[in-house]
Amino acid sequence: MSAAGLAFREAPAQLGLLSVIALVGAVLPVAVTWLTKLVIDSVTGGTAIDVLLPIAIALAVLGALTATLPQITQYLSAEAQRRISRAAKDRLYQAVNRFPGLGRFEDPQFLNQLRLAEAADSAPAQLTIATVQLVKNVITALGLFGSLYVITPFIAGIVLVAALPTLLAELALAKRRVKTTTRLSPDERRELFYQMLLSDERASQEIRLFGSGDFLRGRMMRTMSGIHSARRAVDRRELVVQSGLELFAAVVAGTGLIWAILAAGRGELTAGDIALFMAAVAGVQIAVAGIMSLLAQTHEQLMIFDHYTAVLGAPPEMPVAEHPVATPELRRGIMFEDVWFRYGDDLPWVLRGVTVTVPYGMAVGLVGKNGAGKSTVVKLLCRMYDPTKGRITWDGVDLRDLDPARLRDRIGAVFQDFMSYDLTAEENIALGDLTALKDPDRITAAAVQADVHDVVEHLPNGYRTMLSRMFAEDDGSDGTGVVLSGGQWQRLALARAFLRADADLLILDEPSAGLDPEAEAELHARISTLREGSTSVLISHRLGTLRDADLIVVLDNGTVTETGTHTTLLATDGTYAHLFTTQAKGYQTE
């Protein structure tokens, strides 16, 4: 998508008016210059007042236009900027939402490019407006150059040739600015990260307990100093180059002025000619400088806009079938067939030849030490990634042949690293299925199932209470939001998953990690009832919660080492039995 196409589609009236105003504004300096010459020559030549009056009125009208057009231009430019930036940002995040998996969001290079693309949402407007202004300056420069040429072709030629170094210098500076911005992108993201840590309510407790605030602040300041140092180097170069260019322009103008004064002394130029000459030289230099600056700005914005178009045009990080198979209701089960997976070609294998079946209507527990590959199995089940080798089938259909969005419609999940959104309690639950926003009873039912209804109901505004202190309430209340405890957030995440209680597959990754033993036991009783007869995958380090699973799969270093029920695995006296008895000892008394 071209920048101009986007701009004129979103703000045609504003840009059309700007173009008309630019054309009018382009001829104003030329007209004022010639009228001024006529006035001076008429006055010095003793012309009658009735001849001077129309010229004076014309000058007054042009002066009024010169004074008002910049204000109108500023308003129209700002309005066009708002409209175009909004559309550009919307298209950017439409593109981001189209990425089917997680690969892009775990790629530092892409994240840097995305940050630059986010900063480019104003580029289409700036490019288009700069182009309009560029045309205006070119017309003005040509008009004034023609006026100067009438008086002295030689000086006119010098002024024109003198513009070449300015053009080359401005383009070089623009290229350097963009290069510096691209190079500093990771550092600016890092600086933002430290800022967020130092102001985040969730991090403030640990930061204050461990006294790490000054350490993080120091990191932030060192990062900022490095950024400022690089920016300062660019600014210094611009100072030297542009000062030199201004000095060169002043020498050219001064030389021309000396020539004009000497020519007037010889009777070759009139007083009006000198006025025209001085205005034309200054006007041409200003217009040419404006052209060079706009060309450099356009070049810079085009380079930044390249990041925007790169994100919009980035292909999916994993293939999506052009004609996907309709996702069937799960009736047989899910199979991992010799699945190998790693997060990058230069990274170690996380799963190595995993072959396992999640039978329809059964509860399967995943057990293993940290790093065994349990959470990766969950990501593959949700098709956030594709296996590096092997395949995963849903009732015999390869997940690669399904539409990821339709597959995920049939999956409910609570992830170990669940999100706590700075939204209302109602919205936090409804994000599990946004259709529930129109059906509050479903939200309430899910909260009851997760045993968080009483907590939410007693909040200051019930389900409409903002669960954050980041934003002031905008409902007229005096409150500034409520912050839940970790266990309460965990239950809210469960309620979010329970909105999809009728999903074909329910994934519960450490669903009770933040709960006390009594609440945990009660919750697992609820979950057992909820998933009775349905297909589910449960991950928990508290092995007692997996005792009633129909099948337990033990992962160790990315491979399946044991499968069976709780009873059979204990009898095998393998890894599961060792983990279970070791954990059980902690609950036994002497």
Image: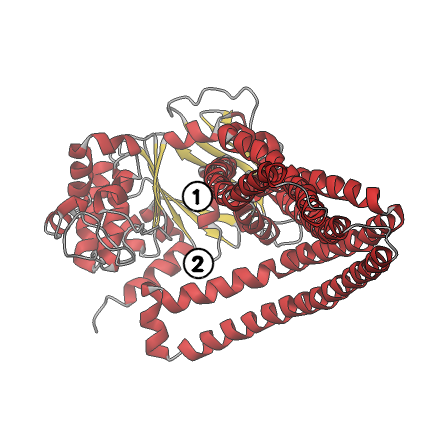
Residue type (three-letter) at the residue carrying disc 2: Lys
Q: Earlier in the sequence, mark 2 or mark 1?
A: 2
Q: Is residue 520 visible?
A: yes
When the figure is inspected, residue 219 is found, relative to residue 154, above or below; the finding is: below
Give amino acid for label 1: Val
Q: Where is residue 404 in the image (x, y as percent from the top left)?
A: 47, 31
Q: Which of 191 and 392 is in front in this view?
A: 191
x, y percent for residue 452 = 17, 48
**Pick the front one: 299 or 97:** 299
Which mark, by number, is residue 369?
Answer: 2
Say which quarter of the image contains residue 498: top left
Q: Residue 300 carries which label?
A: none
Query: How many numbered tags mark residues here?
Result: 2
Mark 1: give few (<14), some (14-19) or many (20+) Cα within 10 Å: many
Give x and y (percent) for residue 587. 24, 66
Tell me what residue is drawn at x 29 percent, y 67 percent: 585
- Seen at 73% across and 39% down, the residue is 143
Q: Can residue 131 be seen in this view?
A: no
Classify 10 Å Cα crowding around label 2: few (below 14), some (14-19), many (20 and above): few
Front one among 178 and 530: 178
For disc 1, the marked residue is: 378
Depth check, front residue: 451 or 81: 81
Q: Is mark 1 on a helix, strand or loop?
A: helix
